[in-house]
Image: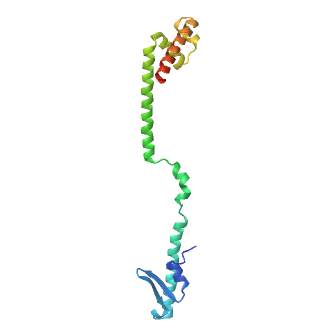
Amino acid sequence: MFDKKSEYALNKHDQDSIIYISVSGHIRLTRADFSSEEEFLKWKAWSDEDYHEREKSGRSFNDNRMDLNECLDVIGTVQSAEDAFFSKLIEADMQAVKKALTERRLAELRSILNAKQYRRIWMYCAEEKSVTEIAKLEGVTKASVSRSLARAIKKISKKFRSGTQK
């Protein structure tokens, strides 16, 4: 519905005058202010039509807009440019930290294992080769590879358990 105190409503309601709202209040032009009845009716029709057009144009704009409160679920899911930029920076930092941690752990592994144990653990864990495959590649028995891996795993668990539990 339209505003009952708007210029359009006031002008439309009063058929004997033309009402305009100015800074100082309402200006009311009556039939007596015009030279003839025809001139009054002409300007009354024009003012009614003008107010009606203004009212319609204002209303159509407001009727077609969306309230932000109704769109909060959609607005919340759109990532801002700043968030996207900073999330990429944070992700890059996390990858750098992860890489540094991995390199540090590999260096610790190299320091506690001999070359043969390190090579066998690498093939077993990183390359996912079986004990049989490792034994075949090195030309040794499965039992020797198995014992070597067991000793390496024992050293690793001892080192990292003592490093995390104080």
Horizontal and vertical percent position of residue 124? 54, 16
Residue 65 locus on image (x, y percent): 53, 63
| Vertical arrangement, residue 50 with respect to residue 98, above or below | below
Image label count: 0
Residue furthest to the top: 140
Q: Nearer the viewer, residue 138 or 159?
A: 159
Residue depicted at 53% across the width and 73% down the height: 56
Q: Residue at x 53, y 61 (%)?
A: 67
**Coloring scheme used:** rainbow
Q: Residue at x 48, y 47 (%)?
A: 79
Q: Residue furthest left?
A: 23
Give coordinates of residue 109: x percent, y percent: 45, 17
Question: Is residue 154 placed above or below 144 in the rendered structure?
Answer: below
Residue 156 pos. (x, y %) = 50, 17
Q: Residue at x 48, y 20 (%)?
A: 162
Whether residue 44 is situated above or below residue 107 in the rendered picture: below
On-image quarter of the N terminus? bottom right
